[in-house]
Image (tube, helix red, strand yellow):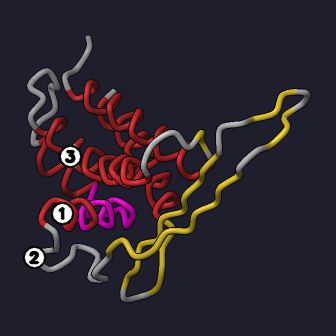
Amino acid sequence: MIHKYEEQWGRVKRWYKRFQDINEGKPHTQDTDYYVDDVYSFFINCYHLKDWIIHDDTLKINDRENLVYDFINSIDCLLYCADICNSIKHLKLTHPPKTGTQPEFKGKDFDLKIAETIGKIEQKTPIISIKFHIETSIGNQDAFIIATECMKSWERFINDKLL
């Protein structure tokens, strides 16, 4: 049986792949604001996977809401994801941060390769990679590392609790 949450889980995976491409390097074919949008969209969609699981009536699991929130509240990366998501959606956190660290995007490191020869083919489209930093009261975090940890955590939850 296909569950409804799987639609959102697939979407989260696609946003993660976009973030991964931005982090590792991709052809620079659009304004950099689009890359920022992709990264923000990852965190929003990743955190809101919880709602799809909670409201998926095809899952025959009792008390899904407590199960999901207990899980999120036990995983640091998902607490960061929640704070990042809510600060993006509302411009700033309007409630005390779940992490207690006031995470927010602060700074990006850009790397741009103008031309490169790969084998016998010259790459003419510039390749851009962007590293996003999240500043917290306990130090800076790499946004892609948090995203990767979120993906691993959700994968583990889905395999252990939903399948």
Q: Secondary structure at mark 3?
A: loop
* Residue at (84, 28) in percent of width and height: 121
Residue with the mark numbered 3: 48
Q: Quadrant of residue 112?
A: bottom right
Q: Which residues are magenta?
A: 72-83
Q: Verify CB contact (< 8 Å) between mark 2 and mark 1.
A: yes
* Residue at (16, 32) in percent of width and height: 61
Looking at the rendered structure, the kind of residue marked 1 is Asn
Tell which circle, 1 or 3, labels the residue nearer the N-terminal end: 3
* Residue at (30, 47) in percent of width and height: 41
C-alpha distance separating marks 1 and 3: 10 Å
Q: Secondary structure at mark 2?
A: loop
Q: In terms of depth relative to the viewer, which is nearer, 69 or 131?
A: 131
Does the stretch in magenta take in 106?
Answer: no
Q: Nearer the viewer, mark 1 or mark 3?
A: 1
Q: Is residue 144 above or below residue 59?
A: below
Residue with the mark numbered 1: 86
Q: Main secondary structure of the magenta part?
A: helix
Q: Verify CB contact (< 8 Å) between mark 1 and mark 3.
A: no
Q: Verify CB contact (< 8 Å) between mark 2 and mark 3.
A: no
* Residue 160 in the figure: left or right of residue 117: left
Q: Categorize mark 3 by other alpha carbons within 10 Å: few (<14), some (14-19), many (20+).
A: some
Looking at the rendered structure, the kind of residue marked 3 is His
C-alpha distance separating marks 2 and 3: 17 Å
Q: In terms of depth relative to the viewer, which is nearer, 109 or 50?
A: 109
Q: Is residue 8 above or below residue 31?
A: above
* Residue at (9, 34) in percent of width and height: 55
